[in-house]
Image: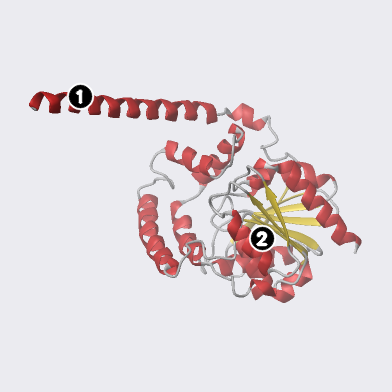
């Protein structure tokens, strides 16, 4: 019996070692595949155009919002998601600016944009957006919100309707939701608990001089998880670099408002032409959320991109640019 146990233990140990070794090899292979050099990034369409106009908009609570702008024509305003930045929209700033005035807004706590004394509620981010649109003299725009940016765009429409209609003619909600992100009857309670625990950990990381992730490889895997099938390594690296640049304390401030966001009972009040866009392999804001959003907004049109993940603007830039271009020009001609 002892000998059998010994043999069984050796077999089990060998199997575990083989699995561990295979997993490590897979990990290192993936890391090598997703790594790109600074020269490769700079030479790609994932680098921001060199002729951007930069604006710093002072907002009411003492914060400052970074906006980049390029091109002329009917305006398209781009608002990124959490942990990202204006560089998320590099393909759109390259290609849509041929026929449009394209503005990408950096949300507070991301990139060069800094928070004021009101902190990080999504309602405050919606106020930032209203002040940016006013300061930049935007009128008749297509407002494009990705992920958290889509939530902020919904809040602008619902809580600042006069400002919204003064500046916005149409809305594009990309890979986002009306909420809640944690489903089920106890979802909001669970979200609050998660946000509290994670927030403490993030603030501790900030005090220790660390980033959002304790090791860089985790940031790479987190970036990869935002994509669908066969992502371009340039896109994974761009996403990783933006995540790495975000301060943990900013993420701690945003996490609770983000997880508790829920306007599902009010979103039917949005009354401008609306496009809802989602990838079928989006695991962060999955298609069921986009479908619910499209059903709730009167007249909204839903577009689903097969095989695409959460990062639609990078994974399907040509299709998204075409949709936004046609949408904007159609609204401008009305």
Quarter occupied by residue 106: bottom right
Quarter occupied by residue 201: bottom left
Please give the name of the residue rendered at 59% of the width and 38% of the height, measured from the top-left corner.
Answer: 229
How packed mark 2 is, by other alpha carbons closer than 10 Å (few <14, some 14-19, many 20 or more), is: some
Quarter occupied by residue 273: bottom right
The residue at the far left in this view is 2
Image mark for residue 10:
1
Does residue 200 appear left or right of residue 13 in this picture? right
Where in the figure is residue 28, as x and y percent of width and height?
44, 27
Residues 311 and 9: in front is: 9
Residue receiving disc 2: 57
Q: Is the residue 325 above or below the residue 133 in the image? A: above
Does residue 311 appear left or right of residue 69 in this picture? left
Where in the figure is residue 75, as x and y percent of width and height?
80, 57
Image mark for residue 93:
none
Whether residue 280 appears in this view of the structure is yes
Question: For the residue labelled by badge 1, is the local secondary structure a helix, a strand or a loop?
Answer: helix
Residues 147 and 267: in front is: 267
Does residue 269 appear left or right of residue 218 in this picture? right
Please give the name of the residue rendered at 56% of the width and 55% of the height, measured from the top-left corner.
Answer: 285
Sequence order check, earlier mark of 1 and 2 = 1
Where in the figure is residue 145, as x and y percent of width and height?
66, 58
Q: Quadrant of the C terminus?
A: bottom right
* Labels 1, 2: front one: 1
Q: Is the residue 202 above or below the residue 38 in the image? A: below
Please give the name of the residue rendered at 40% of the width and 65% of the height, measured from the top-left corner.
Answer: 190
Where in the figure is residue 131, as x and y percent of width and height?
68, 67
Q: How is the image coloured?
A: secondary structure
- Distance Cα–Cα, label 1 vs label 2: 65 Å
Whether residue 74 appears in this view of the structure is no
How packed mark 1 is, by other alpha carbons closer than 10 Å (few <14, some 14-19, many 20 or more), is: few
Q: Is the residue 285 above or below the residue 223 in the image? A: below
């Amino acid at each position: 019996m002892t000998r059998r146990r010994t043999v069984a233990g050796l077999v089990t140990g060998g199997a575990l070692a083989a699995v561990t070794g295979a997993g490590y090899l897979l990990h290192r292979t993936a890391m090598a595949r997703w790594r790109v050099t600074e020269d490769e990034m700079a030479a790609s369409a994932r680098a921001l155009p060199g002729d951007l106009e930069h604006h710093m908009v002072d907002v009411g609570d003492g914060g400052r919002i970074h906006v980049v702008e390029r091109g002329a024509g009917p305006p398209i305003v781009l608002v990124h998601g959490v942990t990202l930045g204006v560089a998320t929209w590099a393909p759109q700033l390259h290609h849509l600016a041929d026929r449009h005035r394209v503005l990408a807004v950096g949300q507070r706590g991301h990139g060069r944009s800094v928070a004021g004394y009101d902190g990080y509620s999504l309602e405050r981010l919606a106020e930032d957006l209203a002040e940016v649109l006013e300061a930049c003299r935007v009128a008749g725009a297509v407002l494009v919100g990705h992920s958290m940016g889509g939530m902020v765009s919904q809040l602008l429409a619902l809580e600042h309707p006069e400002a919204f209609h003064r500046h916005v003619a149409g809305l594009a909600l990309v890979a986002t939701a009306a909420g809640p992100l944690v489903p089920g009857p106890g979802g909001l309670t669970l979200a609050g608990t998660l946000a509290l625990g994670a927030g403490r950990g993030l603030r501790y990381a900030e005090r220790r001089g660390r980033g959002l992730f304790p090791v860089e490889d985790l940031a790479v895997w987190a970036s990869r998880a935002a994509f669908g099938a066969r992502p371009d390594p340039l896109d994974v690296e761009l996403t990783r670099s933006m995540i790495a640049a975000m301060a943990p304390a900013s993420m701690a401030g945003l996490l609770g408002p983000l997880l508790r966001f829920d306007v599902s009972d009010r979103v039917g009040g949005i009354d401008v032409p609306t496009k809802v866009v989602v990838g079928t392999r989006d695991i962060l804001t999955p298609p069921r959320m986009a479908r619910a959003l499209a059903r709730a907004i009167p007249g909204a049109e839903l577009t689903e991109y097969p095989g695409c993940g959460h990062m639609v603007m990078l994974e399907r830039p040509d299709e998204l640019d075409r949709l936004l271009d046609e949408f904007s020009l159609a609204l401008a001609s009305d």
